[in-house]
Image (spheres, helix red, strand yellow):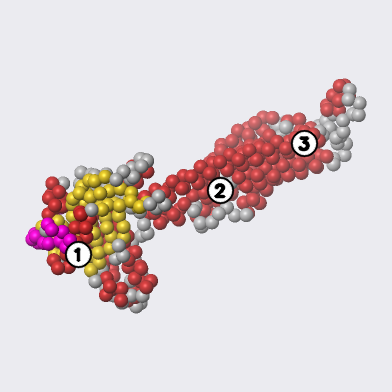
Amino acid sequence: MTLARADEQDDMPLAAEDAAQRQASLALANEALVGIRMATRIRLICMPIVMTFIAYSMRDNAAIWFVEACLVAYATHGIAELLLVQSMVRRRRGIPGVFHIMIAAEMALIAFAMFGSQALFTHPWPPTGLLDSRPVVYFFFVMALYAFNFSPWLMIWAALCASASWSAGMTWLLFLPGTVTTMPQVLEPAAMAATMDNPHFLNLEVWFQDVLVIMLTGFVLAGVVWRTRRLVRGQIAVARERANLARHFAPNMVDEIAGHDGMLEQVHRQDVAVMFADVVGFTRLAEQLEPEATVAVLRGLHRRIEKAVFDNGGTLDKFLGDGAMATFGTPRAGKRDAANALDAARAALAAVDKWNAKRAARGAAPVRLSVGLHYGSAVLGDLGSDRRLEYAVIGDTVNVAARIEHMTRELDARIAVSDALLDQAREQGADLGGLEPAGAHDVRGRDEGVVLWRLPRH
């Protein structure tokens, strides 16, 4: 492996917001999976109840075992549907077309349990007598379970399959010998009653009404599912907004910021700790690398700085090519802002040291990180135009922190810290081990100098 290619490797995982973006595309599929699991549980709980009722109502009927077997097959079919969807979600795929076939097969199974019990077994009544118990209601139960699938189109498909399955059974009854479908021409009450009491009578209006109600119920449930789907999409949008906030603020600050309208719009001044981090000699390092490898190194560096900042309650202000600017005490001041800034600087260096050890093992050049820290008053708030706003921290403290980071070269230091930050960090109980005085230094563009402390390179 060439040196240029070796730099493309990185053991640091992707940032949390990147993972959140990938998961957002699967959120609806995951919700569907959760719904199908719930529907399967309901199905398995309800089946013993239905089977007990069937066993009681058909206790003297030879078809009881046929119907009970169909119900067991229905429960098993639900488990198969769940396993299929689980497999698809794990493979990062949507619900497959075969699921539509399984829905159609399930509706056909329900119809087969109803009408097959009449066709395959001998009864003292004609097959049309089945309709006296209004078995069509079981289709509504099966359809309701598909509302958990989180797809309005599947809901409508389920209604179509239920209507077709019920109509297929009714069509079989229609063409049986002796089936009566017409009412008497003379609408006398006695004649109408006699016709309706005829066990061979098949009321076409009731059949069409059943189909109509099944379809209307399907459309209503599809509307409910669509509305629920919109709510979940709204939650996904909120999650993405929080992920965008997480690119700048520590995770523990995201909820607070998201819950306060206009929190960042109020421009104000407060004391903050500012950290600048930069790679020493990055231009020479980049000359040895191909463009893809250069970007890979920068991404690896940025992820390590980001983690160090966020782990210590900081705000990532911006990436600056081969470096970054972070603040501590924004948007709200904390009790350990200076100490957290120093801890973040040490954490970033430790992470880069660990990274360099792995880079050295594969022959890649080391990344030399330097950090400058300062503490003082700064202006905070949203800056920009009506079309684009950016949360910013500006002022003398920021400028001095940038100058201090640049001084690490002449001080041969990994970390350069102003006396102002060191005093605050000491009061906040920070670990000052390894820091040594570096004297007073002039700061370009500033009349007053600054007293520095440094952490030597080696």
**Residue range of the region highlighted in magenta in the rendering:** 430-448
> Label 1 belongs to which residue?
406
Q: Residue at x 14, y 56 (%)?
A: 418
Q: Quadrant of residue 195?
A: top right
Q: Residue 148 has which mark?
A: none
Is residue 261 depicted above or below 405 in this figure?
Answer: above
> Label 2 belongs to which residue?
82
Earlier in the chain: of badge 1 and badge 2, it is 2
Residue nearest the observer in this picture, 421 or 398: 398
Q: Amino acid at mark 2?
A: Leu
Earlier in the chain: of badge 3 and badge 1, it is 3
Task: Confirm whether residue 72 shows in the render.
Answer: no
Q: Tell whether position 446 is magenta.
A: yes
Q: Which secondary structure, mark 1?
A: helix
Q: Tell whether position 335 is magenta.
A: no
Q: Amino acid at mark 1?
A: His
Q: Residue at x 37, y 41 (%)?
A: 261
Residue 96 falls left or right of residue 215: left
Task: Confirm whether residue 417 shows in the render.
Answer: yes
Looking at the figure, which quarter contains the N terminus?
A: bottom left
